Each structure stands twice: as C-alpha cells, then as structure tokens.
Image (spheres, grey):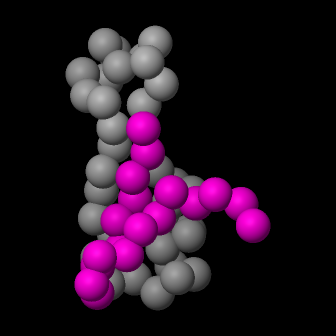
C-alpha cells in the first residue's frame, strides 16, 4: 500500500508531509499540514495527489 500522508482526526482528514531539510529554508517551514475537510477516502487521496 503506498504511503499517502493522510491522517484522520475525528471527522476531518489532514494531509501532512515533512519537508526535506535542504528545502526547509526555501519553504520557510518544517512541514506542510493542510485540512482536506470531511472528504471520503477516495476524495482525500485525489486531493493529496494535487498537493
């Protein structure tokens, strides 16, 4: 099963991805954390691919 970087907290799905150390200065943060709302598993995977 491929790693999707998706986590569910209660009813909300989150995309969480750690930024590699050499790119952190460019992005200005350590990780990307985005809420995908109350997406179904299939919708969440499609949204995560775009991120």
Please identify the dominant SS of the magenta region.
strand
Q: Which residue shows up at 46% across the image and 87% down it?
A: 40
Q: Does residue 50 appear left or right of residue 33 in this picture?
A: right
Q: Does residue 28 appear left or right of residue 15 in this picture?
A: left
The total number of labels drawn is 0
Question: Does 24 appear above or below 42?
Answer: above
Q: Does residue 4 appear left or right of residue 1 in this picture?
A: left
Measured from the top left, where is residue 28 in percent x and y?
A: 24, 22
Of residues 19 and 49, the one nearer the viewer is 19
Figure quadrant of the N terminus: bottom right
The magenta stretch is 1-18
Measured from the top left, where is residue 25 in percent x and y?
A: 31, 13
Q: Which residue shows up at 35% across the image and 65% down it?
A: 14
Question: Does 25 appear above or below 16?
Answer: above
Instruction: Answer whether residue 25 is magenta in the image.
Output: no
Residue 17 falls in which quadrant of the image?
A: top left
Q: Does residue 22 appear left or right of residue 46 in this picture?
A: left
Farthest right residue in view: 1
Instruction: Answer whether residue 14 is magenta in the image.
Output: yes
Q: Which residue shows up at 26% across the image and 28% down it?
A: 29
Q: Which residue shows up at 31% across the image and 23% down it?
A: 27
Measured from the top left, where is residue 12 in percent x and y?
A: 29, 79
């Amino acid at each position: 099963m491929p790693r999707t970087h998706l986590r569910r907290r209660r009813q909300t799905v989150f995309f969480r991805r750690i930024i590699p150390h050499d790119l952190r200065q460019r992005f200005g943060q350590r990780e990307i954390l985005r809420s995908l709302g109350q997406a179904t598993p299939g919708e969440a995977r499609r949204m995560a691919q775009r991120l």
